[in-house]
Image (cartoon, grey):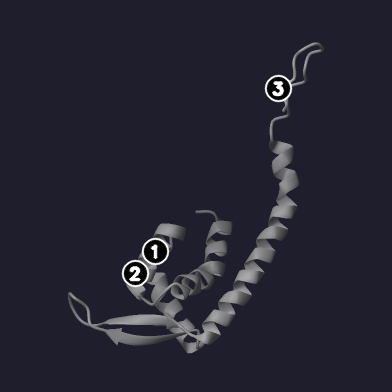
Amino acid sequence: MSEIEIQLKKGVLGLCVLALLSRGDSYAYEIASRMADAVDMGEGTIYPLMRRMQSDGLVVTYLEESPSGPPRKYYRITETGRSRLAEQVAEWRGFTAAVDGLIVGHVEAEAPAAAPQEEGEPSHEA
């Protein structure tokens, strides 16, 4: 994994967790599983992140009986968390648009140039 990929993931984990919780309450293992599938986040990362988010007032917890084993600690996004999510989504969209604007010239420069048409050759353009 490249250094840029590691840093990008670190920067958006909280945003991703808040986005998941905005769709419904969840417990840490389930959040970690969904994050692992989406952004290849390790399970050990979720617990410190959830504690920090709880300390910041972005999420609250409650216990719910589990069909197998001890009760599970569920996380619910708070109004503060919803506000932070909206702010972070706006920042993310602005950031990605700016990066796309910077790299679009590079990507276009690397695209293979169209082959020149010979005189008298029919055009395939619509």
Q: Amino acid at mark 2?
A: Glu
Residue lying furthest front: 126
Disc 1 designates what residue? Answer: 34
Q: CA distance from mark 2 to mark 3?
A: 51 Å
Disc 3 to disc 1, C-alpha distance: 45 Å
Which of the marked residues, 2 or 3, is nearer the chain's N terminus? 2
Q: Quadrant of residue 54?
A: bottom left
Q: Amino acid at mark 1?
A: Arg
In the rendered view, would you say 39 is above or below 104? Answer: below
The circle on residue 30 is 2
Query: Regarding mark 2 in the picture, which secondary structure is present there?
Result: helix
Q: What's the residue at 74%, 54% (across, down)?
A: 101
**Mark identifier at residue 124:** 3
Label 2 or label 3, whichever lies nearer to me, is 3
Q: Position of residue 117 (x, y in %)?
A: 77, 18
Picture coordinates of residue 91 (x, y %)?
A: 66, 70
Helix, strand or loop at label 1? It is: helix
> What is the x, y in percent for residue 102?
74, 53
Label 3: state its secondary structure.
loop
N-term mark: 3 or 1? 1
Vertical comparison of 54 with 17: above or below: below
Instruction: Name which residue type carries label 3.
Output: His
Q: Residue reaching furthest left?
A: 68
Numbered-mark total: 3
Disc 1: CA contacts within 10 A as few (<14), some (14-19) or many (>=20): some
Image coordinates for residue 53, horizontal then vertical, percent? 48, 82
Judged by depth in the image, the label closer to the viewer, 3 or 1, is: 3
For the residues labelled 2 and 1, say whether their Cβ atoms are less than 8 Å apart: yes
Label 3 packing within 10 angstroms: few (<14), some (14-19), many (20+):
few
The foreground one among 27 and 51 is: 27
